[in-house]
Amino acid sequence: MSPLNRRSFLHRSAGVGVLLGLGARAVRSARARPLGANDAINVAIVGLRKKGIQHIEVFRKLPGVRVVALCDADTEFIDLQKAKFDERNESVKTYVDYRKLLEDQDVDAVVVATPDHLHALMTVWACQAGKDVYIEKPATHDIWEGRKMIEAAGKYGRIVAVGSQNRSDVGLREAIAYVQAGNLGEIRSMRTFAFFPRESIGKVNGPQPVPDTVDYDLFQGPASLLPLRRRDLHYRWHWSWDTGTGELGNLGAHTIDDARWALGQDTLSTRVFALGGRFGYDDDGETPNTMIVYIDFKPVPMTYEIRGLPRAKGSSAMDDYNRLRVTMHIECEGGSFAGGRGGGFTYDHQGNRMKHFPGDGGETHQANFIEVLRSREAGDLRADLRAGHISASLCHMGNISYRLGRHERPRTIKEAVRDYPTASEAVDRLLSHLDANEIDLERNPIALGPTLTFDEGQERFVDQYGDWANMYVKRNYREPYVVPEVV
């Protein structure tokens, strides 16, 4: 805990408890003002680090949109952004407690760029308060939350978009349409990648101080209120299971979504397995920095590979697959496509470029959200809540398999995946990668997760490992930050 003494912490917590005494009734009693076609849409930005700052700048510049409120559990970030509004002579309200923001009748929509574990709760509460929502990826922190978010959006008639902005990239949209039209023949394989450098987050030997500017209770929300045991509170929450979803839910939420979209898969896969580990350093991170996930879509499965270590020990360069690092590779009968955000290229089987699909990074994604707020035609969203739920759930399924994994020798792992061609060759390349980084797999073995079978209708795992896997379908929520069974 921060240099706050116990008495001051309890005093602040008691203040929060007073607000909570109003209960869900206070949240549900709020209703957004009715919007006319020409009315300005008032937006609040929640979470004011890198992504939240980007959202401020994008939404400020959209015609007919006003950023009227800022919210963060850390007043340092509020003060930094509030100062910029003051410099522009623009008025903006500020909130530390998200629930107080939802009582603001001037706010029409909230844009949520917080840690993963807060996404579902903030979406459900916003729907109950009559606010529309733009939620960053991954849409959820666990599989169960997605269904509750969808139910809340439907019950309260809210528009909920997900920040999967690749679906707005003009080049990627054109490329996927090109592939789906059969211009390269049938799709034969789908490989996706996140070869992105991740350094150690360090290792501490005891509780660390929380910054004085942070309301730690609000920051943790549904997660356990335990002493901070990492060097930095911010961003590194990604690598803790209680607040984040690892690299699979971080970069994977984009790339797996791209690949699922390209494959035309609009449902969850029934079978998933994963393997990997956290290699190259001993730190306080819990999630894997090296991973292979196999998603058994029919007729074309998908593999997703994560590497946070460099090409070799001591190198500053990262591995690649046919020059690809953070993207997807679609192998087709008549050629291939490689790309993602920013578009991409088609290639012939000799590796020669054939057609370029220049992209724009999905810069109109937020504008699409605003257009739909005016039309109320949810079907016009490029990345709606159901799509976000499915893609996030595929990430969760891979993480669950990994977390149930057993440490195995390379020979056992190679034997386990030999009937899955793309996974088998990915394992061979992974073993070479770990060898180049001088990883001793006897001392730090690979975790091989079980193949999990999923019943999409029930949104539950079944068969041999179902009971264990279902323990991860829904988190244990900390009162009062609870996504309700009945929204």
Image (spheres, rainbow, N blue to C red):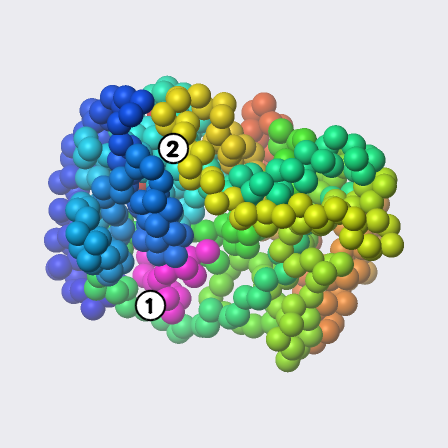
Q: Quadrant of the N terminus?
A: bottom left
Q: Residue 202: image x %, image y %? A: 46, 72
Q: Quadrant of residue 307?
A: bottom right
The residue that appears at 17% across and 42% down in the rendered structure is 17
- Residue 202 vs 395, above or below: the answer is below
Q: Which residue is mark 2?
A: 370
Q: Residue 351: image x %, image y %? A: 82, 55
Q: Which residue is mark 1?
A: 207
Secondary element at tag 2: helix
Relative to residue 338, is residue 138 drawn left or right? left
Q: Residue 10: image x %, image y %? A: 16, 54
Disc 2 crowd, CA 10 A, few/some/many (<14, 14-19, 20+): many
Q: Depth check: give the residue in front, 51 or 443.
A: 51
Residue type for callout 1 = Pro
Relative to residue 424, is residue 384 drawn left or right? left
Stretch in magenta? 225-238
Asked whether residue 377 is in view, the answer is yes
